[in-house]
Image: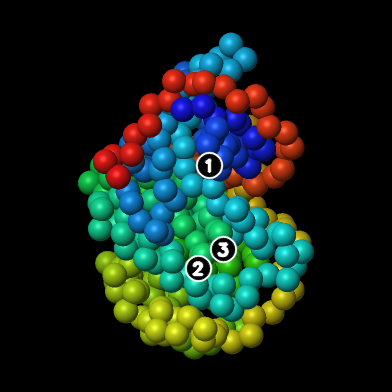
Amino acid sequence: MEWARGDVLGRGSSATVTAATSTSGEIFSVKSVDFSQSENLKKEQHILSMLNSPYVVSYKGYDTTRENNNIVYNIFMDYMSSGSIIDLINSRKGVGLTNMEIARYASNIVKGLDYIHSSGIVHCDIKGRNILVHENGAKIGDFGCAKWANQVSLISGTPMFMAPEVARGEEQGYAADIWAFGCTLIEMITGNSPWSNVTDPCSVLYRIAYSNEIPDIPSVISDQVKDFIIKCLIRDPRNRWTAKELLKHPFIQQFDENSNEIVCEKIGTNSPTSILDQDVWDSIEESSSLSSLSSSLSLVMDDKFGQSTCFSVRQRIEQLACKSETEKWVSEKGWITVRGCGAVIDRCGR
């Protein structure tokens, strides 16, 4: 297949996502990384190739190309015209999402989670930046941290969205995705990250892992929506609702029965220009920052749990470095020359 690489849509710690067009005129997105660093992207390709849901970003194939004397590994996916939920909020310049958008996206996300969990997969990094939107709704994207439920692996994801059991290093299963989904709903409603009232990253990690607290739930929403979020944020993962149970919640059922009905109360429009204004974690991506965080975390944990506990928590934070792609959908104009690339298109029989 011949295709041309277009505007850069997002950049993560290692991979780059660009728009692309084939010679037949099809527009899609391409996630690319240097072949020598492609192990994680190959794992993502394998997982995506096994999924087929209207609530998960569609996989279209993969190939390798030679660009600027480097071999590049690429996977092809849906082009989502509005970017992520975060980009959509940012584009509104403080206006925020509408009630109907929040209800529709919540319905789409929980259906996507039910599908991937039924397929034996844990996403491990649910958050607004990894929920992609277009005119028909939302899809779960970025499976760079995903794993099989029975797979023993390092903890991954974004600390601000971590469930208590994940922050303690105990487990990262389906229930952890549900907690992150509850945090994402707060993000969608308020225009702020969960735990946005805490400015010290060490303090918020301690609160997630060892307190009895949950993120502040907005007061402007209806009791029904508040109850739905609470079901996602039960601290004990054994009692937290599953995606299948959430599908039966009146909030989702009411929206599905009548998608024209507004199921939330009026939501304020005082969201910041950038939803990440108060996100203390997004700046912690480089190793130097992680080193600083580790030192601070050591001081926080010493008084309560001693050096051995502090060391294990510090290790877990360091293990999160660069595992979560935090794409920012931007425009870098210009299409490069269409070229033949010897594509290997894998549609899994679909």
Q: Residue furthest left?
A: 150
Q: Is 27 on the left-hand or right-hand side of 231?
A: right
Q: How far apart in space, not on screen, are marks 2 and 3 (Cα)?
A: 11 Å
Residue closest to the eye, 23 or 6: 23
Rendered position, 92 above or below 261: above
Q: Which residue is mark 1?
A: 26
Q: Residue at x 46, y 75 (%)?
A: 229
Q: Is residue 81 left or right of residue 52?
A: right
- Quarter of the rendering occupied by the C terminus: top left
Type of residue at label 3?
Glu
Image x and y of residue 8, in percent: 65, 37
State if disc 3 and disc 2 touch (CB < 8 Å). Answer: no
| Of 78 and 126, the residue lying toward us | 78
Which colour scheme appears in the figure? rainbow
Q: Which residue is mark 3?
A: 135
Q: Earlier in the sequence, mark 2 or mark 1?
A: 1
